[in-house]
Image (spheres, helix red, strand yellow):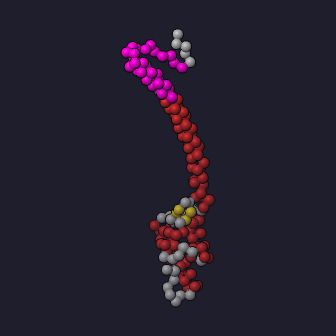
Amino acid sequence: MTAAAGQSGAAAGAENSRRLQEYLDALAAERRPLPMRNGRVNVSAVALACGFDRQVLYKNPAAKEALDLAVEAMGLAPENAEEPDVKPEVRTPDRRERRIHKLEQENAALRAEVAGLRERLRRVEHVETHMVETGRWVSSLPFLGETGE
C-alpha cells in the first residue's frame, strides 16, 4: 500500500510526502478541516485518504512536518482542542451529584409514604377482621403514639 514494487525507501518516502501534501492542499482549497477524533487529528483517516499506512505520518520526517504545519495553519493545535473537553467533565459530576441527591430524597419520601400506607392497611385489615367476626363496626383505632381516649 505504501510504495510500488521496486521503489527505494527514499523514493517511497518522497511519494508519500507528495500524496500527503496533495491531500492537505485539497482540504485547504475546499476549506475543510482535517479529520478529528477526541480533539486530535485522526491520523488513521488522513493516512487512509492519502493511500498509505498511518505509520508514515509518524516515521517519515517530511510527512510529519507537513502534517504539523497544516495543523498549526488550521488552528487545530492540541492545546486548543483539549480545552473545551475539560470544562464539560468538570460540570458533569456536579449535575450528576445534584440528580443523585434529588433522587435519594424522593426515594426516602416514598419509603416513608409506603410505611404510612402499610400501617393504615394494617388498621383497615384489623377493622375488617373484627367486622367479619362480630358483625359490628369498630370505633376508629388510635394512631401510633395516641392513647385512644
Name which residue lies at 52% across and 10% down: 149
Looking at the picture, tell me which residue is in the foreground, 99 or 41. 99
Query: For residue 98, which quarter of the picture?
Result: top right
84 or 44: nearer the viewer = 44
Note whether 78 is above or below 149 in the view shown. Answer: below
Looking at the rendering, the stretch of residues picked out in magenta corresponds to 115-144
Judge by depth and name the residue closer to the eye, 61 or 3: 3
Q: In the drawing, does residue 109 fall left or right of residue 125?
A: right
Q: Is residue 99 visible?
A: yes
Reply above or below: 114 against 128: below
Residue placed farthest to the bottom in the image?
6
Q: Residue 141, how many percent across, how many down?
A: 48, 16
Query: Residue 56: x and y, percent?
Result: 56, 76
Q: Residue at x 56, y 63 (%)?
A: 40
Q: Which residue is at 53% across, 66% downward? A: 42
16 above or below 74?
A: below
Residue 126 figure quarter: top left
Residue 124, magenta (yes or no)? yes
x, y percentage for residue 116?
50, 26
What's the residue at 54%, 20% (across, down)?
A: 144
Extreme-front residue of the structure: 133
Front-most of residues 145 and 45: 145
Examine the residues drawn in magenta and state their main secondary structure: helix
Residue 70 among those drawn in magenta:
no
